[in-house]
Image (spheres, rainbow, N blue to C red):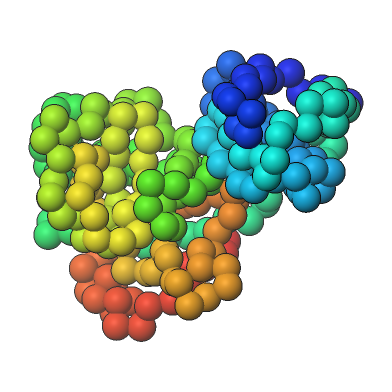
Amino acid sequence: MVELTPSVFQIGPQYTEIKWSEQVSDSLLIKRLSLEKSLLKDLGNEIDDLRVAYQSIVVKWKNQFPEDQFQKLIKTTSTQRATLSDTVWKIPVCYGGQFGKDLLNLASEKKMSEEEIVQLHSQANYRIFFYGFLPGFMYLSGLDPILSTPRKSIPDRSIPSGSVAIGGDQTGVYPLESPGGWHIIGRSPIPFFTPSSIPPVWGKAGDLIQFNPISESEYERLKRNPKHPEQV
């Protein structure tokens, strides 16, 4: 049994932050998912809202912080309560050209060819850690450090939905049209957020993502009949 050892910070009477100091990894995600499950199972009636990030959970309590119950839960929760998904989603992406306006500049900055950037980006497996920023925006781990690139100093005013981008040491997909400061390297023709569906997203925390390069003609074909990505 592997015990969880996060730091706990009380932010007023109704907010508690639980934070891990270790690096982002699959083992950290298991710990966070384990504690999420325990909180919802054992203290769900006390919780008004729960927000997660790579290395933290913030809980808003309905009333005052149930300290005794919470401390007991922290001490007894183990990683046996959670396992990572073996689901792999294959995301079609048309890289470069009209769909990836920053790919050429990124390749030049890295002293690589566009093809080398695409190969590095598409050969990795990315793990969904959580959703945030925009409805359906997946925060992913797994970007090759070679591709890590500082965000733009001046964000773009409008980034099309489906745009695949790199920002800092992360990569992601803009599910909706939005301003943004990440470098756009391609675009996917599939939907990433469908409000009328339950749930409105097809992936969950712990799932794996693979980006699959496609041609412009294939992009247009898939765009005419959008559907969820394939599971590998």
- Residue at x-position 56% and y-position 41%: 51
Left or right of 32 in this view: 171 = left
Q: Do we see residue 143 in this rendering?
A: yes
Viewer-proximal residue among 46 and 169: 46
Q: Total of numbered circles in the picture?
A: 0
Left or right of 98 in this view: 31 = right
The extreme bottom residue here reads 225
Q: Where's the C terminus, which quadrant?
A: bottom right
- Residue at x-position 78% and y-position 32%: 66
- Work out whether 127 lies above or below 223: above
- Residue at x-position 73% and y-position 18%: 5
Viewer-proximal residue among 46 and 163: 46
- Work out whether 2 lies above or below 161: above
Relative image position of residue 4 (x, y in whole percent): 76, 23
Q: Where's the N terminus, which quadrant?
A: top right
Q: Do we see residue 30 in this rendering?
A: no
Relative image position of residue 106 (x, y in whole percent): 17, 35
Viewer-proximal residue among 170 and 119: 170
Quadrant position of residue 60 = top right
Relative image position of residue 29 (x, y in whole percent): 63, 35
- Residue at x-position 13% and y-position 46%: 156
Quadrant position of residue 68 = top right
Relative image position of residue 212 (x, y in whole percent): 39, 57
- Work out whether 115 lies above or below 232: above
